[in-house]
Image (cartoon, rainbow, N blue to C red):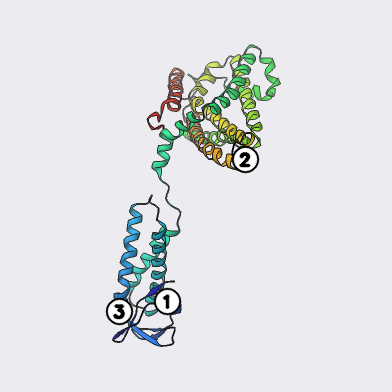
Amino acid sequence: MSSIQLRAGRGNLAGSIALDDLVCSDFGDMLAVRHPSGQFWTMNKRQFLKDRTGAWKRFEYLLNRYSQNAGRKMRAKEVLEYSRLFRELSNDLATIRSRAWGEQLDSYVNSLVARGHNQFYSAPPGDIRKVARFLAYGFPILFRKHLPYMLAGTLLFFVPLIVTWVLVQNNPDIGRNVVPQVTLDAAKGMYSYDPDKVQGQNNDSRASMGGFYVWHNTGIAFRCYVGGILMGVMTVYLLVFNGATIGTMAGYVIAGGNSKAFLSFVVSHGSFELTAICISGGAGLMLGNAILHPGQRTRQEALRVQGFESVKLAAGAAVMLSIAAMIEGFWSPPNAVPSVIKFIVGGVLWVAVFAYLGLSGRNHEV
């Protein structure tokens, strides 16, 4: 309960008076306060300022301290002091306004109360440095820590992709057993152009396609991850299905004589996109394994432990997919850049992704 020290006439009021027990009356510039005993004590503006200024300065000091160290958390003792002072200042503001003790004083205390409210009740600001550190080396470290799951996701995705690619490229007719013929024909028609002669898209079209790819690619990865809740069965199915679908369409398009247009389009963003899908699938397998093999933990505990790290892996994969979508929307489509440059850039990006996941953060590993 908040309290203030009051003086009455020449003597001091013994102890503190709880603010909840105060009743104020209108006596001009004097503040009349009734003690729980029933007696009235009076305090003028000067005495009020003398008694309360110390608390205001202390609260202002705390506000400045925590605003300058936004990432610092309050200790329990500090939270209690902050909360007590905030309640007292709120009562002081009500007193000042009821007595009309001046706009300057009102404005000062009101600003402290407003800042205190925002500091105490608003969500803590995100630390961009933590995000940057996670993306710089935390994510690759986590990837290597759970490498068996990542490799499992990669095999489940790329083996069907490569097998169907080879089979359909050599025998296009079997492609319709995996993907509807109308879809295959549409894909073939999309890449029926010479990438070094066709004019590029305008910026509005590229931005629109970039947004579509973010939604589409992230959706695939999200389903691969969330599918792990069903003991990993859905994750396995989605990885194999999407791998086989992509491989079938790639083989069919290349068999139709459109290899240059197709490969120059996918080579750059594919490094981020396909790798991210594999990582999302691996994270989903982590969830499935936690349910099937919790070990010494309960399934709930295993899900909590594995789930926390798998969520971070999925978040890193989502960032990779966003990068892939921007490349796919702005760089990959036919434009003034020769296809040979796109192949070179694409090769560099594949090497960069492998180097990032395999080497980044090794100095920070325990």
Q: Is residue 205 visible?
A: no
Can you say which quadrant of the picture contains the N terminus? Answer: bottom left
Q: Nearer the viewer, mark 2 or mark 3?
A: 2
Q: Nearer the viewer, residue 46 or 361?
A: 361
Numbered label attached to residue 47? 3
Q: Which quadrant of the figure has residue 242?
A: top right
Can you give x and y, in whole percent of width and height, for residue 348 in the image?
42, 21
Q: Which residue is mark 2?
A: 299
Amino acid type shown at disc 3: Gln
Q: Residues within 10 Å of mark 3 (few under 14, many from 20)?
A: some
Three-letter code, disc 1 = Ala
Q: Quadrant of residue 300?
A: top right
Measured in 3D between alpha carbons, the distance from the residue under mark 2 to the one under mark 1, in whole angstroms, is 51 Å
Q: Nearer the viewer, mark 2 or mark 1?
A: 2
Dot 3 lies on which element?
helix
Q: Is residue 110 above or below residue 19?
A: above
Q: Is residue 45 visible?
A: yes
**Residue at x-position 51% and y-position 25%:** 270
Q: Earlier in the sequence, mark 2 or mark 3?
A: 3
Residue drawn at x 40%, y 38% as measured from the top left: 132
**Dot 3 or dot 1, earlier in sequence:** 1
Element at label 2? helix
* Residue receiving disc 1: 18
